[in-house]
Amino acid sequence: MKKALLAGLILVFVGLGCATKMMQPSAVTPGMAKKKIIKGQTTQAEVVQIFGAPNLVTKMQNGGELWVYSNYASVRKAIGLGLGTGILGGGDSVGGGVGIGGSFGSSVEQSRNINFLIKFDKNEVVIDYYFSQLQY
């Protein structure tokens, strides 16, 4: 009988994945504020129509109010790597196999907090607005 040798199966698998979890985008952006808010003209009622209710309202000494809109976003990136090799061989009625495998995984999380502050005068008209951003 002829002996047959089956050799030569090598498998290398490399997979990179990325998973992201993020809150819904908010309408409160610097571009939207610049487009929709006119200092000395836009009223509180118009701001509510554009951006919705604020997260925080504070009375100021001049009789006006300071409104704060906060937006928190968190992004998690997962990276995975898997490697494997294998060799199969056989003869008349003898078979054999060798295999090696391994894997590695990691994740990174980034968070960002954006605050949009709007100052109103005592007549409920926008005096000023600004953004602050903290990324960690």
Image: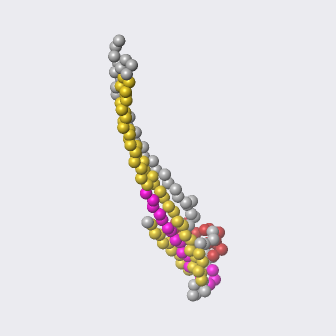
* Image x and y of residue 71, in percent: 54, 67
Q: Quadrant of the N terminus?
A: top left
Looking at the image, residue 1 lies above or below residue 73: above
* Image x and y of residue 59, in percent: 59, 83
As drawn, which residue projects farthest toward the front? 94
* Image x and y of residue 114, in percent: 50, 68
Q: Main secondary structure of the magenta part?
A: strand
Query: Residue at coordinates 56% horizontally, 74% vertically from top-left?
Result: 68
116 drawn magenta: yes
123 drawn magenta: yes
Total marks placed: 0
Query: Residue at coordinates 43% horizontally, 57% vertically from top-left?
Result: 108
Query: Residue at coordinates 45% horizontally, 52% vertically from top-left?
Result: 78
Please report the bounds of the magenta region as a residue range: 108-124
Looking at the image, residue 27 lies above or below residue 106: below
Query: Residue at coordinates 65% horizontally, 74% vertically from top-left?
Result: 45
Res 35 quadrant in image? bottom right
Residue 39 visible, this angle = no
As drawn, which residue projects farthest toward the bottom? 61
Specify whether 43 is left or right of 75: right
Specify whether 123 is left or right of 113: right
Specify whether 133 is left or right of 98: right
